[in-house]
Image (cartoon, rainbow, N blue to C red):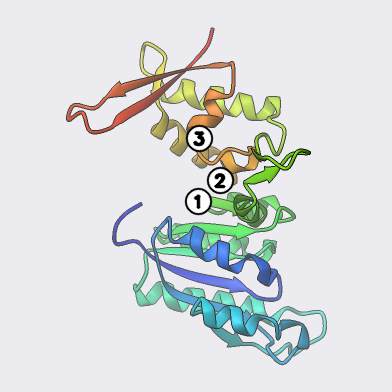
Amino acid sequence: MIKDTKIAVLIDGDNIPSKYISEMMEEITKYGTPTIKRIYGDWTKPHLSKWKNILLENAITPIQQYGYTTGKNATDSAMIIDAMDILYSEKVNSFCLVSSDSDFTKLATRLREAAMVVYGMGEKKTPNPFIVACDKFIYLEILANDDDENTKDEQGKKTKKTNLYNITPKVIKLLKNSVADAADEDGWAFLGDVGSLIIKKQPNFDSRNFGFQKLTPLFKSLPQFEMEQRDQTNGRFKLIYVKNKE
């Protein structure tokens, strides 16, 4: 993450459940500082009333958008217009678009063409075109799972969740190909480079989808890979390298 990364967070209030907001805002701070935080919706509608306290707690500005015509989503248009105004203001260098709606696919593409980094957040029902239009896409469900990382077994003892979702052959192929693409002549690849390459290939890839907080324990759990720690020149940190097994 660049230290001076400033993020505009734009939320589709008609499309995102309020229960995710606290975890979502905490996740966004990993990538930069959310300097603009806006949520769009028709706040005259009763079903959006539960947002009030949540918005105050997270300093998110509600933007009123009336639904002018039945069956048309005016919220999307207002959010897109605001995004372009923010882009031309040059006050931020990243955007976080929070929606499960594919209508924002073109907006994400346009922002990236303008050299903006675009993070997407939405539920697992989000259509793939919007996901791949973002630099990185995060499923909101896994943020909720983070808070419930430790569960209790039948005897009441705390146990750590692992493998929340199956690691399919398709995922293994993605990992192996990415290691091979980033590897040196001896087949070893720096794990940080591998992780960056994986996200470029598949923006919605996240080790938390499989029950692991970080990429390192995910790779360590798989028999298809070798892992190796190497000392840095200054000796302060160890670098993790990974290699495909023959």
* Relative image position of residue 67 (x, y in whole percent): 73, 87
Disc 2 secondary structure class = loop
**Image point 29% across, 57% down: which residue?**
3
Amino acid type assigned to the residue bearing label 3 in the image: Leu
Nearer the observer, disc 2 or disc 3? 3
| Residues at marks 2 and 3, CA–CA distance in whole angstroms | 14 Å
Among numbered discs 3 and 1, the one appearing first in the sequence = 1
**CB-based contact (under 8 Å), mark 1 and mark 2:** yes
* Relative image position of residue 141 (x, y in whole percent): 67, 54
Q: Quadrant of residue 50?
A: bottom right
Disc 3 secondary structure class = helix
Amino acid type assigned to the residue bearing label 2 in the image: Pro
Question: In the rendering, which numbered label is found on residue 215?
Answer: 3
Q: Quadrant of residue 186?
A: top left
**CB-based contact (under 8 Å), mark 3 and mark 1:** no
* Relative image position of residue 32 (x, y in whole percent): 39, 60
Q: Relative to the observer, which residue lies in front, 216 or 187?
A: 216
Q: Is residue 87 above or below residue 244?
A: below
Q: Is residue 107 visible?
A: no
Mark 2 lies on residue: 203
Among numbered discs 2 and 3, the one appearing first in the sequence = 2
Question: In the rendering, which numbered label is found on residue 135?
Answer: 1
Q: Residues within 10 Å of mark 2 (few under 14, many from 20)?
A: many
Q: Is residue 243 left or right of residue 222?
A: left
Amino acid type assigned to the residue bearing label 1 in the image: Asp
Q: Is residue 144 above or below residue 46?
A: above
